[in-house]
Amino acid sequence: MKKMVGVKCEECGRISYPERTFCISCGSNRLKRVELGDECELVTYTELYAIPVGIDQLPLVLGIVRFKNGARATGQITTREVKVGMKLRPVWGALRTIRGEKVYGFKFEPIK
Amino acid sequence: MREVAIIGCGMTKFGRRGDRSLIDLMVEASVKAIEHAGIDKKRIDALYAASMLCGELTHQTAIASALADELGILPAAAERLENGPASGGSAVKNAFLAVASGLYDFVLVTGGEKMRHVAGDVITDLLATMSHPTAEYIHGVTLPSLAAMFARLYMKKYGVTRKHLALVAVKNHANALKNPYAHIHRPLTIEGIYSAPEAEVNNPVVADPLRLFDFCPVTDGAASVLLCPAEKAREFCDTIVVISGIGHATDTLAVHEREDPTILKAVRLSAEMAFKMAKTSPKDIDVVELHDAFTILEIAESEDAGFFEKGTGHKALEEGVTALDGDLPINPSGGLKARGHPVGATGVAQLVELTWQLRGEAGKRQVEGAEQAFSCNLGGFGNNVVSFVLKRVR
């Protein structure tokens, strides 16, 4: 199963997602890959009715989530039953079409 | 470094301009700025053209070359500057540097965008390409969706309500009624978009919690300013307006990487730099243009730029402080919300408005006696911000 992976800075401890070359906080290149985990919490969200070309869900539910290790990520939420603070887990799936090509990535589904 | 003045400005009517090409619009704004300054255009040394999406939307690239050619100012140096929605501010900043350094004396900056002929979902998608490609864009994130997620946090944390957001729209639409260049000439009432039963229909949800009238329109238009060393400005104008401060800062590309996403750090930093350079402070500013692409942004920027304590901008709004007849008028032009937001033109249009204000040429929306002005041109969702302080020199 695919896992969400970010980076942890060995200089300042900052965890960021997605993977990158230099730390977003201190600029260091001493970054170590870390798994973000299987559980996160919804920080904020929107139900988007003005969807961009390439998206076929209406409304599209988007949110920012926070993992236990402090990492944050943005993505689609698979339900319209949304509430700030709800527990979610990352799942791999089709996200949208970009120039005719299907694009895949992580989205977030509720943990029952 | 030489002091730099704005000696001329001009803009087209903003709106749906199916009658004009992008270059036509940019020529019109440029000619107005040249005529406003009363300068022989052959004296122009350089041109900075700002546009975010000319290639994608009008199928024309390298528009600075086309504009210099069309204006008949060859062989002036010419380049296009693209910096997302902060393209206009960035272009003026670079023109300022060119004049301040002594490289050029007379520099024209013209920002323009033509967008209305393209379908809404295509525009939304093209604008979304400025977001983080893998962390945001591929998920369907758009700028309105980022604004909505930001607004939800903001409203909860600071007690901002939907009514406050509606008040920004009502105020800026009212100001735009006094601006002949504004895209939207349509009065709004708080009842019509917020409290009356039909408000639900008039003002539908676009990106919950934000509604239709929380968003700026998609607009065609161009705006232009002409810069020269302040020491040469007297030849062209009696009232000299100088660019006394510039600040420019970046923030994380992905909004989720911000420790506190309700703080627009690049607005804070760029405003601090601009005030420091101008040797002034927010309390000495008389008139302000902020980047209200979304109503919530006017409130947030009014705080992060230093005019109000964090979390109190909506109260100042409610008390009328930021109204045209208040102590600190914000967006007398109507702002992006109602003047419109031809993306590459916006940063320039803000400075056009403020220059008119400082010269006493703003007509029915004139802020009497304005001496210092501030603008904030915000790129991305706050990841690239250019701020200016302008000052009237007697």
Image (spheres, rainbow, N blue to C red):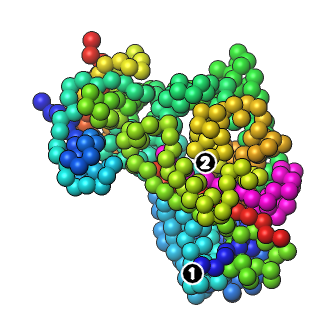
Residue A45 image offset from top left, x and y in percent: 43, 27
Mark drawn on residue B101: 1
- Residue placed at 40% from the left, 48% from the top? B252
In the picture of the structure, the residue carrying the numbered disc 2 is: B305
- Residue B61 or residue A6, whichever sits in front: A6
Residue B348 image offset from top left, x and y in percent: 64, 61
* Quadrant where the image shows the C terminus of chain B: bottom right
- Residue B162 or residue B55, whichever sits in front: B162
Question: What range of the chain is rendered magenta?
Answer: B355-382
Residue B198 image offset from top left, x and y in percent: 70, 19
Identify the amino acid type marked 2. Ala
Relative to residue A13, is residue B24 depicted above or below?
below
Q: Residues within 10 Å of mark 1 (few under 14, many from 20)?
A: some
Residues tagged 2 and 1 counted as in contact (Cβ below 8 A): no
The answer to whether residue B348 is seen in the rendering is no
Q: Does the segment drawn in magenta span residue B356?
A: yes
Identify the amino acid type marked 1. Ser
> Label 1: chain?
B
Q: Quadrant of residue B34?
A: bottom right
- Residue placed at 76% from the left, 45% from the top? B328
In-image side of B222 versus B356 (left or right): left
The answer to whether marks 2 and 1 sit on the same chain is yes
| Dot placed on the residue nearer the N-terminal end, 2 or 1 | 1
- Residue B62 or residue B276, whichever sits in front: B276
Q: Quadrant of residue B358?
A: bottom right
- Residue placed at 71% from the left, 69% from the top? B242
* Quadrant where the image shows the N terminus of chain B: bottom right
Kindly state the secondary structure of the residue where label 1 is placed.
helix
